[in-house]
């Protein structure tokens, strides 16, 4: 009799964990990712697009307990074909070699009313750094939005960086680039 009760309790625990935990996949068609790069010493800025490749979020008890997002670096776009080609080259993101960039949550994050922080590993060009980003989720946890800055030099993207080439003037490119977007999960 005790064995039956123990199995019933274990089954109930397994079932309740599944009820309060939900995993959602990214909707590639309804998600948006824009990059912005700026000049280091002027207000000149350029913006283009990237596409998500894959993504999943697991939410349990009002916390994100798992988040994995992959970006297809071969999707890097800009209306200027020369710039697009240059950004895809060895001077910048080497997309023929490094086709994917990823973010993987390293610790659970309590979902707040408004922006909250996620901490995880960002990998660009096979270089992984622990990062903290501010994000927001809508009320039904279906859309994650963000506007974050990333220091490209941490990922050995140093072309025309004022941190590496001190004598640059108007050709200097700011070390920080921005990624902004929204990820819809279903």
Image (spheres, grey):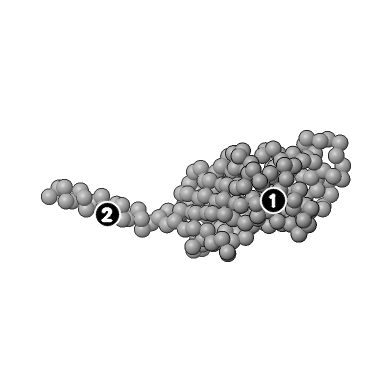
Which residue appears farthest toward the left when viewing the image? 1
Q: Is residue 162 left or right of residue 130?
A: right
Q: Earlier in the sequence, mark 2 or mark 1?
A: 2
Pick the front one: 100 or 120: 100
Which residue is found at the position 59% from the left and 43% from the top?
Answer: 122
Toward the front, the furthest residue is 96
Q: Residue at x 56, y 47 (%)?
A: 103
Q: CA distance from mark 2 to mark 1?
A: 46 Å
The picture quadrant where one finds residue 48 is bottom right
Q: Position of residue 153 (x, y in %)?
A: 71, 39
SS for dot 2 = helix
Q: Which residue is mark 1?
A: 178
Residue 131 can be seen in this image:
no
For residue 68, the mark is none
Is disc 1 surrounded by few (<14), some (14 to 19) or many (20+) residues within 10 Å? some
Q: Quadrant of residue 19?
A: bottom left
Q: Relative to 180, is 30 above or below?
A: below
The kind of secondary structure element at disc 1 is strand
**Residue at point 24%, 51% (across, down):** 9
Residue shown at 83%/35% (left/top)?
A: 166
Q: Residues within 10 Å of mark 2 (few under 14, many from 20)?
A: few
Left or right side of 15 for 58: right
- Where is residue 124 drawn, in percent x and y? 63, 43
Please say whether residue 23 is visible from this viewpoint: yes
Q: Position of residue 140 (x, y in %)?
A: 49, 63
Question: Label 2: which residue?
Answer: 12
């Amino acid at each position: 009799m005790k064995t039956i009760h123990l199995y019933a309790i274990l089954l109930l625990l397994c079932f309740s964990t599944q009820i309060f935990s939900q995993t959602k996949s990214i909707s590639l068609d309804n998600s948006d990712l824009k990059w912005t790069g700026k000049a280091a010493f002027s207000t000149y800025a350029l913006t283009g697009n990237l596409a998500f490749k894959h993504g999943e979020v697991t939410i349990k008890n009002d916390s994100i307990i798992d988040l994995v997002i992959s970006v297809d670096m071969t999707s890097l776009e800009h209306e200027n074909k020369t710039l697009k080609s240059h950004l895809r080259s060895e001077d910048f993101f080497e997309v023929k070699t490094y086709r994917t960039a990823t973010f993987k949550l390293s610790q659970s994050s309590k979902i707040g009313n408004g922006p909250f922080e996620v901490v995880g590993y960002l990998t660009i060009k096979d270089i992984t750094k622990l990062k903290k980003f501010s994000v927001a989720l809508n009320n039904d946890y279906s859309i994650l939005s963000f506007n974050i800055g990333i220091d490209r030099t941490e990922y050995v993207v140093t072309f025309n960086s004022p941190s590496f080439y001190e004598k640059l003037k108007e050709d200097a490119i700011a070390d920080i680039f921005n990624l902004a977007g929204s990820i819809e999960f279903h």
